[in-house]
């Protein structure tokens, strides 16, 4: 459905399937709210509902995430100024208290899978292949997750491994057609109650979700759903790792994944002149996609220099498919004469009420900024990312142990501790994909198949019999992922760009000086204490965006967790980083 809606009195056109955020961005409206403290402009940043920076007021109701809210004809949308209270009139659409709580819809199954991306889909198919009944709870409206995004008007994924998508989707829908699998789209999980099973058929795991499409009689748009299962596979994926620098909160600055979401799902390039910066192979994919969409990529600034891959060439060549994709992306950049600058980083952004330029600096081989090397590059959009971090909320809530990822070698990344089949320390709870270690879609699929089959065996009360080919493929892909992380670390000097006035926690507007004071004067020795003293990580995103930066800055100030480099291991346990993230919200 296409049409128009009003934004601050202006008429905005939208295309079928577009979100409010995408339509507004396409129309040049990048500032969507002002902050509660300083009244600073904010806009779309993560693009997937994690950061809450794109909150707007829709038909009188505040706190609506523009990046997730579908545009509809006749909507009246306006900028959200600070913290706005919801309407209290007796309007059932706005919300009124119920006299009696609404009973949740109850579902019982063998295996419940949380997440509908490559890992979740593969886990569901793997479990069904062993005869288990499966329910998939997916917060998204369509299958595929962040990797296999459907394009505008619901066009099926075509950029990334389209044939693999087709085969997996056919297997998934085939299992649904014979009644083994039930796909619940638009279901956000907010609570997990794992209870030890007393028998193979005991449905001891209880998952609480809300159905965003289940309109209640009183007009409220979320229906409670409870799923009881014998086994569970958590496949909640990952989101961008982002780190603070002066100006990173300006409208026009996006996470790399946010720019990808705008482009692939909504057909909206991040800007006319775009800078892509950070580290990791994902930057190549994003930059080539922007070029194909007609944007001018004025520079790709990669903090690494490629030497890490040179030392790991045997591992790299073991996965030729990925190398082939990277070569294709690089060819697109070369044909468009995009300046690709290794060992460079964006250290600041500036603009009045939106991004106008970024400051780029050269880095030494050890990751420090070379004095006097910085220059300003004019642009209207910046896509920045330092890789990805797992979405651990629900896994932590289920009682899973968090530790160093098995896929990242010496890099300081966290993940759920699990074995080769995704089995965690909690009986009946398995993980698949990025939750067990960020490693890309190929690894996500194979870990999904292994976890799904193991979960089905647990539900039947029989020993699992993992496929030998999948185990070997998992080892090879995990080794590749470890090499990738080691070759693309966060540069050790990244914090040099952080000034005292730099916002670190976007939600609560906590700056670096406040965080430093909490350590040096108030005695904070870890991220959790800093959180209690400064409110960093206590806002809308619950530490998902600022958690990494806060943990690294606190560690640097206390000397307990220095920035990792390719040749050193972090001293402190990364569980402390994960503890900053509140596990009470949905995935």
Image: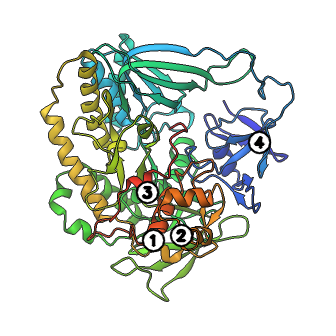
The quarter of the rendered structure image containing the N terminus is top right
Say the numbered circle drawn on residue 57. Answer: 4
Residue at 44% across, 51% down: 578
Residue reaching furthest bottom? 372
Residue wearing tag 2:
519
Packing grade of label 1 (10 A; few <14, some 14-19, many >=20) is: some
Count residues near mark 2 (Cα–Cα under 10 Å), then give few for <14, some for 14-19, many for 20+: many
Name the mark nearer the viewer: 4 or 3: 4
Which residue is at 39% across, 68% downward? 560
> Mark 2 against mark 3, which lies toward the viewer?
2
Q: Earlier in the sequence, mark 4 or mark 2?
A: 4
Distance of mark 2 from mark 3, alpha carbons?
42 Å
Task: Provide the secondary structure element on which disc 2 rests.
Answer: helix
Residue 362 falls in image quadrant: bottom left
Q: Are marks 2 and 3 in contact (CB under 8 Å)?
A: no
Q: Nearer the viewer, residue 335 or 166?
A: 166
* Earlier sequence position, callout 1 versus callout 2: 2
Label 4 CA crowd tier, 10 Å (few <14, some 14–19, many 20+): many
Tally the marks: 4
**In the image, is residue 298 above or below residue 34?**
below
Kindly identify which residue carries mark 1.
558
Please, what secondary structure does the residue beneath circle 3 have? helix
Q: Earlier in the sequence, mark 4 or mark 1?
A: 4
Q: Which residue is mark 3?
A: 288
Q: In the rendering, at what x and y percent does residue 454 appear?
A: 24, 27
In the visual, does 32 lie left or right of 538? right
In this rendering, which labeled residue sits more in front, label 4 or label 1?
A: 1
Give the CA separation, mark 1 to mark 2. 7 Å
Labels 3 and 1: the sequence-earlier one: 3
């Amino acid at each position: 459905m296409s049409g128009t809606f009003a934004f601050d009195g202006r008429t905005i056109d939208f295309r079928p399937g577009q979100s409010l955020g995408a339509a507004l961005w396409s129309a040049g409206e990048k500032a969507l709210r002002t902050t509660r403290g300083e009244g600073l402009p904010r806009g779309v940043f993560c693009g997937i509902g994690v950061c809450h920076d794109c909150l707007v007021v829709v038909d009188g109701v505040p706190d609506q995430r523009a990046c997730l809210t579908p545009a509809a004809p006749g909507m009246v949308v306006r900028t959200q100024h600070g913290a706005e209270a919801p309407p209290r009139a007796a309007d059932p659409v706005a919300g009124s208290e119920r006299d009696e709580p609404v009973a949740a819809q109850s579902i019982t199954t063998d295996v419940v899978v949380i997440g509908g991306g490559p890992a979740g889909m593969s886990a569901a198919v793997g479990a069904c292949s062993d005869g288990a009944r499966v329910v998939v709870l997916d917060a998204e409206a369509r299958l595929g997750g962040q990797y296999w995004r459907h394009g505008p008007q619901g066009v099926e994924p075509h950029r990334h491994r389209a044939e693999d998508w087709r085969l997996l989707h056919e297997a998934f829908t085939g299992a649904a057609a014979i009644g083994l699998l039930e796909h619940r789209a638009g279901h956000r999980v907010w609570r997990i109650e794992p209870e030890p099973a007393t028998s193979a058929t005991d449905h001891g795991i209880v998952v609480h979700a809300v159905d965003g499409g289940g309109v209640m009689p009183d007009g409220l748009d979320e229906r409670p759903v409870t799923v009881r299962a014998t086994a569970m596979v958590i496949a909640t994926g990952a989101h961008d790792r982002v780190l603070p620098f002066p100006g990173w909160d300006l409208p026009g600055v996006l996470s790399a994944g946010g720019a990808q979401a705008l482009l692939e799902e909504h057909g909206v390039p991040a800007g006319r002149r775009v800078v892509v910066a950070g580290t990791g192979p994902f930057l190549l994919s994003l930059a080539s996609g922007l070029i194909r969409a007609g944007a001018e990529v004025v520079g790709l600034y990669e903090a690494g220099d490629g030497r890490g891959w040179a030392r790991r060439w045997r591992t790299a060549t073991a996965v030729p498919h990925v190398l082939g994709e990277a070569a294709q992306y690089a060819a697109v950049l070369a044909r468009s004469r995009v300046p690709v600058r290794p060992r460079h980083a964006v250290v600041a952004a500036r603009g009045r009420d939106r991004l106008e330029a970024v400051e780029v600096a050269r880095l030494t081989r050890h990751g420090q900024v070379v004095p006097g090397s910085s220059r300003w590059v004019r642009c209207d959009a910046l896509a920045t990312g330092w890789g990805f971090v797992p979405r651990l909320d629900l896994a932590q809530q289920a009682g899973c142990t968090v530790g160093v990822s098995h896929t990242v070698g010496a890099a300081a990344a966290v993940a759920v501790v699990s074995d080769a089949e995704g089995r965690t320390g909690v009986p009946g709870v398995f993980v698949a994909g990025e939750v067990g270690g960020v490693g890309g879609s190929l690894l996500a699929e194979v870990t999904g198949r292994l976890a799904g089959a193991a979960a089905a065996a647990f539900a039947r009360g029989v020993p699992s019999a993992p496929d030998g080919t999948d185990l070997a493929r998992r080892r090879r892909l995990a080794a590749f992922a470890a090499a990738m992380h080691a070759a693309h670390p966060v540069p050790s000097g990244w914090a040099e760009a952080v000034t005292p006035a730099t916002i670190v926690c976007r939600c609560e507007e906590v700056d670096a000086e406040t965080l430093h004071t909490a350590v040096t004067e108030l005695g904070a020795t870890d991220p959790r204490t800093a959180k209690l003293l400064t409110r960093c990580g206590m806002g809308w995103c619950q530490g998902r965006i600022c958690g990494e930066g806060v943990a690294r800055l606190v560690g640097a100030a206390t000397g307990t967790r220095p920035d990792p480099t390719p040749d050193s291991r972090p001293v402190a346990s990364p569980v402390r980083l994960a503890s900053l993230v509140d596990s009470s919200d949905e995935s």
